[in-house]
Image: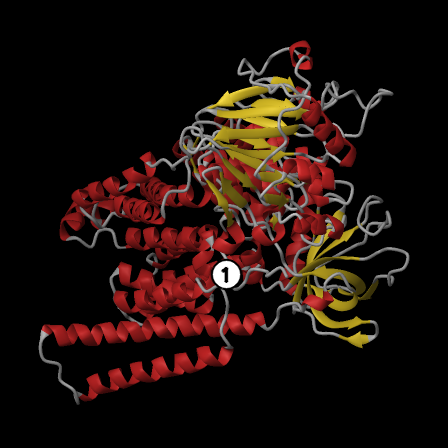
Amino acid sequence: MEAICAAWLVGITWQLGQARLWGAEIYLVLFLAAGAGLAWMVYVWRQSLYVVQGRYRRWGQRVLVWTLLVCMGFAWAGWRAAHKMADAMLPGLERQDILVEGVVDTLPQLQSGRWRFTLAVKTAELNGEPVQLPAKLQLSWYFSASAVDDANDAMPDIHVGQHWRFEVRLRAPHGSMNPHGFDYELWLWGQGIGAVGYVRTAKNAATPRLLADAQGSLVERWREQVRSKIMHTVPDARQAGLLAALTLGDQRAISRDDWQIFRTTGVAHLVSISGLHITMMAWLAMCLINWLWRRSVRLMLWLPAHTAAAVGGLLCAVLYALFAGWGIPAQRTVLMLATVVLLRVVGIRWPWYTVWCFAAAVVVAADPWALLQAGFWLSFIAVGVLLAQATDGIDGQKQLERKERYPLPDQLALQPWWQRLWKSVWRSCWQLLVVQWRISIALAPLTLLLFQQVSVVGLVANLFAIPWVTFVMVPLSLLGMVWHPLWLFAAWAADVLLAVLQWLSNWTWAVWSSAVPPWPVGVAAVLGAVVLVLPVWRWRYRLLGLLMVIPVLVWQPTRVAQGEFEVIALDVGQGSAVLVRTATHDLLYDTGPKYTEDSDAGSLMVVPALHALGVHVDRVVVSHVDADHAGGLYSVLAAYPQADLLASAPSGDAVWQSTAADHIPCVAGLSWQWDDVQFTVLHPTVQMESRGSSRALSGNAQSCVLRVAATNSVGKEVAALLTGDIEAKQEGELVARSADCSARIHSTGPIGASAADSAEQQCGTSLHADWLLAPHHGSKTSSSGVFLDAVNPQWVVVQSGYLNRFGHPDEDVLKRYSQRGIQLVNTVSCGAATWRSDALEQMQCERMQRSRYWHHQVQ
């Protein structure tokens, strides 16, 4: 059975690697043909019409059956994907003003001047004609004065179940694509969301109309009422957000800072992994029902205790999943638990690992894309540990040990009731702690593989957090729905939890980060951790598991050689973030845009990518303080406090109060050398004036321009030029200084050289570069012809957002690139773009390397 399930999973995994889908009919024919072949094999075996002689023939038949199952899994996933793709948004409808009717079908989230919610579409019209839209849209409704389309100040009142009619502007789902980064497009695909956009509230837009108040969605409406009551009962928003997560599974009210604390201390699974929550809730319910059921002889005669406990635990899991929103991860977990319970109820006594594999095959059949979700693997391993824990003691020796450890029933009868109760409670608590510790250890390598970090203080944090959350916070949170004042006690418990975790997270060695290892090393570590904690295997096998984990702990990524450098233009949307790597040093040029008060590219994209690559940033360069370039600065410096900061910013700007190890103004003439690679600042010529000064220029005009150069193996200089948001005037100044001054800057002294020393070297070095970061994202006011002629790049990289409102890159600029034979790379279509000084002709695009059929194809 394990081989059958594995073959099915291999087929689905194979299909998930497709970059383009075939027609649905091709998958259907393949599935039917493979199914017919498999049915014939089963029929032949059962009728004994074909007797196989010899070991090799038996193996041949098995291989044939496995091959047919692989084909069936491949065809099944492909057929599901082809039908799902039919719900995709038509390209011609992007950025059109479409009148939509629909129902709000998820809890709306209020954040930073907007409502965010999912709309189930009923009808749609474009210019009075009906159009076909995806079944589900993810929409934002802005209500601040600075919002898109000159939104009104009035805040709309959005509730789940409401039927609305309003005008929207949509686009296809398009996310950033960075090394080992979060696949936002896959997440939207899994949620069934076919387009994203916003509600138009401009004067020329149709007035939004509420056609019907909350209808249907009884569970969602109840959840919204409970969330609203929590927010009104608990005055502290931080505590209320945590209680909403524990009660409703709604983690969106938890702040970014608190999420960072949870990740640092290794307890994020207590508030963020709904599958693990549901599994633990089912396990607790099973233990309680089993204990109560065994107290009644009549109930035991009517139904065995283990059967009643299994069914009761499943029902509890279903109810909890419904109340938690019945999301895709919750559905997967319930289906996995239902499979396990059904097998036990009908009397199929497979080994725990067979049940484990079969449950995974069933879940993946229902949701093939679960194999690509971190939540599936976290829940899958947690369920495996629980199954193994449930079968602990099947060995005869362990049964004897258990008899010696626990008194017999007649001995228990002689003990006082309070002593029996205490021992029973203590044993249950101990079992809960043991299983939680086993799950934490089993998930550690997988957490490192998925999130590139493991909490060193996690064991200590979980020792406190697990019983505190399980026995104090969760009961108080759930009972608070019956008597609201209990939420105040739960809020006090949340405050205690946050205080302890905050203290642990402040330890300098609280987290250990590592680059993403090759997949064989990562898979071996995950398997080794599972073997290490399973109670059904002997210690010699557990030691083997420990040996399998060691390689992932010592693995180090390869770097460029001495005298070479690598440039990675990260995909951060409408903003800039470029990583420059030498043999032993790393420099980050700009930190990406800021999205909201609690969200920026630094925390969402830049830092995860740097962790995945094994980067230890030595210096952060901020070209200027505009939000699309410096928006992620504080998140980056929080992750890399040892980094220096080189910035072009007014003297009184907030960046100079950041937590960087050293603060250095960006002034032309500064230069330094790392690993035989020369870094030279070309602009601005003087430190940026404060914005209140009469001599102050715009931030764009004062952008820090950095040239990186090295000599390759044949003695030729190879260079990259990072330009920030300079415009045509500054480009002309750079060209003039480069032409008028023959002296080159060769200073290799400390970067902290005084401004007076730097002023003596204001003449520019050579502007030629093989790799050019397009000035100002390719705007029409930049990339002048004289500048492009002076730089004469082979590659130009544009960092811009998909369908951005600025129109970057400009069509005239693109023509200038094309006329000069410059190869253009746009992060919109390329994703993160990687270029190395030892491979001038090659540009590696992350979106092309990871291309899958659910990814948006930019024309």
Q: Is residue 125 above or below residue 670?
A: below
Write the residue at 77% across / 45% down: 780
Where does residue 228 sit, x and y in percent of width and height? Answer: 70, 49
Q: Which quarter of the figure is the N terminus placed in?
A: bottom left
**Residue 88 shows in this picture:** yes
Q: Is residue 403 above or below residue 101?
A: above
Write the residue at 48% across / 74% down: 79
Question: Which element is circle 1 on?
Answer: loop
Residue under label 1, please give it: 852
Inspect the image, locate mark 1, and give the three-letter code of the amino acid beneath it.
Answer: Arg
Q: Which quarter of the figure is the C terminus placed in?
A: bottom right
Looking at the image, which residue sits at the far right?
Answer: 203
Where does residue 417 sit, x and y in percent of width and height? Answer: 33, 43
Where does residue 558 sit, x and y in percent of width and height? Answer: 38, 37
**Residue 255 shows in this picture:** no
Write the residue at 52% across / 73% down: 82
Where does residue 54 sit, x and y in percent of width and height? Answer: 9, 76
Does residue 560 appear left or right of residue 236 in this picture?
Answer: left
Is disc 1 surrounded by few (<14), some (14 to 19) or many (20+) residues within 10 Å?
some
Does residue 398 appear left or right of residue 171 in this picture?
Answer: left
Asked which quadrant contains residue 85, the reply is bottom right
Q: Is residue 187 above or below residue 735?
A: below
